[in-house]
Structure formats: structure tokens, C-alpha cells
Image (spheres, helix red, strand yellow):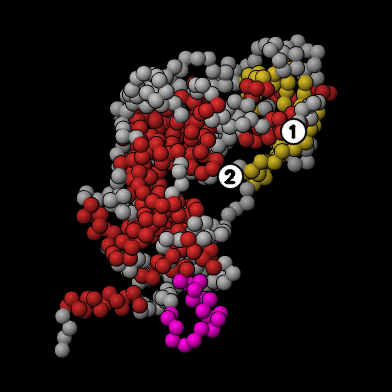
Amino acid sequence: MKKPRAALRSHHRKQASRQEGKKCVLSSSWVKPSTPNDLARRQEEVVLQTFSPYHLFRDTAEVTAFREKLLSWYDQEKRDLPWRRRAEGEVDLDRRAYAVWVSEVMLQQTQVATVIDYYTRWMQVTPGKEGEGHEPDPRESPAFGVGEVNQLWAGLGYYSRARRLQEGARKVVEELGGHVPRTAETLQQLLPGVGRYTAGAIASIAFGQAAGVVDGNVVRVLCRVRAIGADPSSTLVSQHLWSLAQQLVDPARPGDSNQAAMELGATVCTPQHPRCSQCPVQSLCRAHWRVEREQRLALRSLPGSPDVEECAPSMGQCQLCAPPTEPWDRTLGVTNFPRKASRRPPREECSAVCVLEQPGARGGPRILLVQRPSSGLLAGLWEFPCVTAEPSGRCERESLLRELQRWAGPLPATHLQHLGQVVHTFSHIKLTYQVYSLALDGQTPVTVTPPGARWLTHKEFHTAAVSTAMKKVFRVYEGQQPGTRKSSGRSPVSTPSSRKRPSPGQQVLDSFFWPHLPTDAPHLNSTAQ
């Protein structure tokens, strides 16, 4: 007797999830659909691929369970962060999007604890709440400088982020009528520096679009929940992770869904010491299932104990599993996932840098800073004069002295003193600075400097747009000065409560949306003088 077609289809679906040889995956390409129903249909599409359905969610019920468990946990455990408070309390969509945009850009490659103070300073000026007496108007834009942006960003690293944020905000004001694009697709298309992740975060959190996001935390959560052991940076795995993230977004709470997944990865499903016992989706986690299975095997569990579903393709290696050369390590547990990407060690470079000081300058001792080129590493920031050097140190002093004379005129070579070295690692460069000092004692103070150079007091240095590496150099210098403690070079991060009103540099990008703030006060550290 033949089975009804519906029964046959149900039977085949069950077999596909259990038997070897059946391989499928959610469509990895995402194009913004015209309606939510189109989105749902696209998410459920299954196409033949080179990996097992083991790495998928079984059905809609499992997806729904994941959403509900995660959001319930997030509502109880989410951290109180300033960008979340701003997004939740802001009714103006453009200002809400801007608040999310700034936070997402700052959080790229940077820890939350570091970002909080920078974000607070950046966003602290809010007309209406600070007694300015006028409402923000995103269609008006004041003059502003790249130097001011760099100053506000100084120490946060990855300075190109600040420049792209500035370019994007300028485009919103000058070309888009003061309105931030409303969808992930248009955000990515129209705003410089806004990629797929940032676009999805702004669209979901600020505008309620059901757009998934994938950052490092989400990668870790999804790789463990679906036991994905292949390299997450590969195109195939990355596309699959984006498909899973899109599938898991709750259309009723898309912003919270994305933030909950990121929060889970940041606080519970951490890289080295995950707290699985506190994980709200532990019961749905295939990595956890694998750990339990290995524990039972190690204890030689009795025959008939429930088995754990595994990936078992019959034709070749599953492209979402770890390669055979990287077998399961029982000592790692769930941290077997995700696979650690092989990283090239940073290339090593050497530089010689000098703190040139005028002890007898008017208004107190001053030190020379010069501005870096407008492109490349640390573009537009200020630094002490420095030159590329050889590890051997050959001709180092001579090259450095010529560089100093280029900015300050004839100098006494005999006064150039070596103080020590500073090692600073950028994302791809390990740079060793040989630190020198030279004091212009008894000389006529330098009053004229070429463009791209300036003399600052020690106090002004601490608020200038300089890199963390230069702050390290200055601490070495101060540590060599009589009566100066080595720690005195540190400049505490100022908070809103520590000042009556912000400096013009702190108003730069906020001024796109709060344009009437005074910006004509003289600013020592914004542009070359």
C-alpha cells in the first residue's frame, strides 16, 4: 500500500536529518526581500551543498525556542551600557541611529570597558538637556576639523574608523538631508565605512529591521551551538553563519535579538572560559552535546544510554566540520569551537624618536610635535619627530638629528641623549622605538615653526591628538626628569562630571545633529598652526 504524499515528505525530512549522504544548507546569499514573508521563505530555502544538515536548526520550533530562551535571558542579564540607554530613550530616529552608529564603530576591535568612557565623552553634549535652549537640527552642519576628531579618538586605536565616521556623518548632513538611511542595504550602500555588520546593527537596533549581524561574539556562539569546526573566516563558513544569524533574528525584537546574541558571546560564551552552566541555550548547543557524549564515553556508560547526534556525511569531508588534521581535544570542551584562525605574526620595525624640549620657552617648557601624513598608519595624528631605524642602530642618531633640524633648525648634536626604548604593537606591526631627548638649554627659543609642527606645554600634550605609543614615549621621558615620577605622564580619562562644558573637539560629530553649539573657541590641538 502506498503512503500518502504528505507522509512520504515527512518521512524523507526525518531521514535527511538522521542518515548519511543527505547534505543541505540554508541559502547563504542574502538579498533584502520585498516583504517579511519573502524573507521567511528565503530563510527556509534548502539547497544541495557540501555539508550536513547537522549544522542547521532542525525546524521552526527549534529556532523559536532559541529566540525565546535567549531574549528571556537578555531581559534579565543585559549590561547597563550608555549606548543602550541612549537608543532606548531616544525617540528621534536619526539621533537614535547616530547613537548606535557611533557605538558600533567604536566597539570594532575594541573592548566594551575601553569604549565606555570614549563614547560618553563623544556623546555627552545634548542640547536641551544641557540648557542650550534649542532643539537639534540634523540639517545644519558647522565647520569642523579632522584634527579635532583625532583628538577625541586619541588612544582608542584604529583611527581610520574615526575618519570614516566623520565622512559618513558629513554625507548624512550634506547629501541625505540630515536623515540616516533606514535599511541595512541602503546604510551599506550610501555611507562610507559602514559594512554589513554595522549596517545590520544600526538597521535592527535603531529602525527595527529584521537584519542579522555577525561579529566575533556571534561567530563564537553560532559555531558552538551548531558545532561548526571549520575556519569561520572562510567564505563558505562565513556565508553559513550569516544565514544562521538572519534566521535567528526575532522579527518582533530584531535589535534585542542581535544584542542578546552578542551579549551572550561577550559574557557567557567567552573564548577561553565559557560559563556553560549559565547559558540560556545550553540545551540547544551541539558543542555541549558533544562534551556530554565524550564524558559518557570516558566513563564507559552502560549500553543503551542515549546517543548524541553527530555530523556523518557519507561523501567526503563535511566543509563545516574541523579538518581531520585537527581532531577533537577533550581538554578543550566546547572551546574546540570555533576553529582558531592562523594569524601571521606582526612584522617588526624600528624607529628612533626624540622629545625635543625648550625649557626656557614663554609660559613654561614646551615640546615639539609634528603631524603625520593624512593617510596610512595613524594618519593625521601628532607625534614626536621620529625616523625609521635599523635594528642595529647604525646611523640612528645622525638620521634623527637631521629630522630634528628639519623642524627646529640647527641643533647641538652632543646634547642628544638616549633614554631607553618603547615597544608598541599595532594590529600588524610590532614597532620598537628608541627614545631620545634633547633640551635646548641656553638657546634662543624657537618662535617660528614650519606647517605641520607645533610646540606644546606638557599639559597640552595630554589632551592632544597623539597615539598611545607616543604617550608611552612621553612617560619614558618624564621618568628621566628630576623630581618626576614615572607614572606622572598618565592623563586620566575625563568624564562628563569632571568638566562644566566640553571642549570644541568633543562636539565635532555630535554637532552634525546638535549644530548650534559654539565651535568658534580657539582649539590648540586641532590643526597645524
Asked if residue 338 lies in the magenta stretch, the reply is: no
Residue 498, percent from left and from top: 55, 26
Residue 374, percent from left and from top: 53, 29
- Identify the residue at image location x=68%, y=22%: 458
- Identify the residue at image location x=47%, y=14%: 520
Residue 214, percent from left and from top: 41, 52
Q: Amino acid at mark 1?
A: Lys
Secondary structure at numbered mark 1: helix
- Identify the residue at image location x=35%, y=43%: 205
Q: Is residue 123 left or right of residue 478?
A: left
- Identify the residue at image location x=45%, y=83%: 305
Q: Amino acid at mark 2?
A: Ser
Q: Which residue is mark 2?
A: 427
Residue 177 visible at all: yes
Secondary structure at numbered mark 2: loop
Q: CA distance from mark 1 to mark 2?
A: 27 Å
Is 517 above or below relative to 153?
above
Q: Which residues are magenta?
A: 289-307
